[in-house]
Image (cartoon, rainbow, N blue to C red):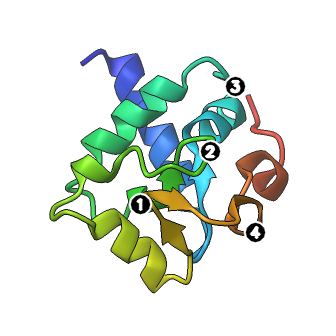
């Protein structure tokens, strides 16, 4: 992996570590916050690569519709859903219910990223 990709992954992890308990955000929101609005797929790759990092709450990152698209990267059949439900986030049919209630926008919460 290229060094600049690794640096981007590290930036993604720093944002994900700040998602509050009981909240979720999207791949695209993280990409926009990092100034790379068209890189939501790369954020997804970063989340996939984080599965052995205990301090990165990857289960709190869903797609823009609240779908648990990363669930296959968690051990067990429903671990991502279980982790979210343990935090009080309702999930039905692999989708966060009432997404607006549980959505955390890094740009609103953290302000503009300094260049």
Q: Is residue 72 left or right of residue 38?
A: left
Image mark for residue 59: 1
- Distance from disc 4 to disc 3, alpha carbons, whole Å, reads 25 Å
Give the vertical position of 28 relative to 68 (above or below): above
In x, y percent, where is residue 113? Answer: 75, 38
The quarter holding residue 5 reads top left
Assess whether mark 2 and mark 4 are in contact (beta carbons under 8 angstroms): no
Please name which of the two marks, 2 or 1, marks the residue nearer to the observer: 2
| C-alpha separation, residue under disc 4 versus residue under disc 2 | 13 Å
What residue is shown at x 61% (from left), y 31% (from top)?
31
Q: Using the rendered image of the protein, determine whether residue 33 is visible from the camera's viewpoint.
A: yes
Which of the marked residues, 4 or 1, is nearer the chain's N terminus? 1
- Neighbor class of circle 3 (other Cα within 10 Å; few <14, some 14-19, many 20+) is some
State the mark number for residue 65. 2
Q: Is residue 101 left or right of residue 4?
A: right
Q: First in sequence: mark 3 or mark 2?
A: 3
Q: CA distance from mark 2 to mark 1?
A: 15 Å
Can you identify the residue that label 3 sits on?
Answer: 35
**Is disc 3 in contact with disc 2, using a CB cutoff of under 8 Å?**
no
Please tell me whether residue 22 is drawn above or below residue 81 in the rendered image. Answer: below
Query: Of helix, strand and loop, which one carries label 1?
Result: helix
| Camera-side mark, 3 or 1 | 1
Label of residue 101 in the image: 4
Residue 50 located left or right of residue 18: left
Q: Residue at x 24, y 48 (%)?
A: 72
Image point 55% across, 21% down: which residue? 39
Q: Quadrant of the N terminus?
A: top left
Q: Is residue 83 above or below residue 55?
A: below
Could you say whether the residue bearing mark 4 is in a helix, strand or loop? helix
């Amino acid at each position: 992996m290229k060094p600049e990709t690794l640096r981007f992954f590290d930036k993604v992890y720093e944002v994900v570590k700040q998602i509050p308990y009981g909240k979720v955000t999207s791949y695209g929101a993280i990409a926009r916050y990092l100034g790379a609005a068209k890189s939501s797929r790369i954020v997804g790759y970063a989340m996939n690569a984080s599965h052995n990092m205990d301090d990165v709450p990857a289960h709190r990152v869903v797609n823009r519709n609240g779908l648990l698209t990363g669930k296959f990267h968690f051990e067990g059949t429903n671990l991502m859903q279980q982790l979210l439900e343990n935090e009080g986030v309702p999930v039905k049919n692999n989708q966060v219910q009432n997404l607006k209630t549980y959505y955390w926008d890094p740009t609103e919460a953290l302000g503009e990223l300094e260049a």
